[in-house]
Amino acid sequence: MKKNIWLAAFALSLVGCASAPKPLYQWGSFTQQTYLMYNTPEKATPSMQIIKLESEIEKAKAKNLAVPPGLYAHLGLMYLQQNNPQKASENFQLERQVYPESTILMDRLLQKMNANAGGVQR
């Protein structure tokens, strides 16, 4: 019985030594950029956000971590605000590809963007 107690204590002590789990996403400054965009827009202009978010994507790839949900879509919106529909479309499609659950929203954004580009308003 005493041997079992010591084995259990030893096993529990090893569990405490385990390393922290690897994060799933590389969030970086994405949440802060989104917050600033709504609360102090002058500190997070679309051009500033594009630079920072592109940097976050590179950091995520370098660390073999996933880009967080919504980052590509947000980046697409920033490109759209910069009047660059080609890059906006690329990022909306990337969001749809990486996160299939966003397909309906991304398809609607792409349809609306294409309709506005063609001069047809819905």
Image (spheres, rainbow, N blue to C red):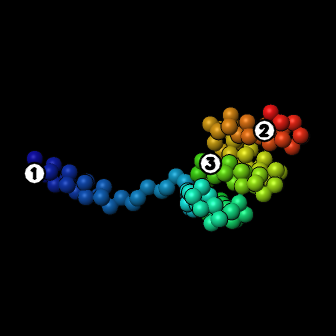
- Residue drawn 74% across and 44% down? 93
What amino acid is found at the position of numbered circle 3 in the picture? Gly
Secondary element under disc 3, as helix, strand or loop, is loop
- Residue 119 in the image: x percent, y percent? 89, 40
- Residue drawn 68% across and 34% down? 104
Q: Which residue is mark 3?
A: 70
Q: Which mark is residue 112?
A: 2
- Residue 116 in the image: x percent, y percent? 84, 41
> Closer to us: mark 2 or mark 3?
2
> Closer to us: mark 3 or mark 1?
3
Q: Which residue is mark 1?
A: 2
**Residue 42 appears left or right of 32:** right
Local crowd size for mark 2, using a 10 Å CA cut-off: few (<14), some (14–19), many (≥20): some
Secondary element under disc 2, as helix, strand or loop, is helix
| Alpha carbons under labels 1 and 2: distance apart | 71 Å
* Chain-order first, disc 1 or disc 2: 1
What amino acid is found at the position of numbered circle 1 in the picture? Lys
What amino acid is found at the position of numbered circle 2 in the picture? Lys
**Residue 14 appears left or right of 20:** left
| Alpha carbons under labels 3 and 1: distance apart | 54 Å
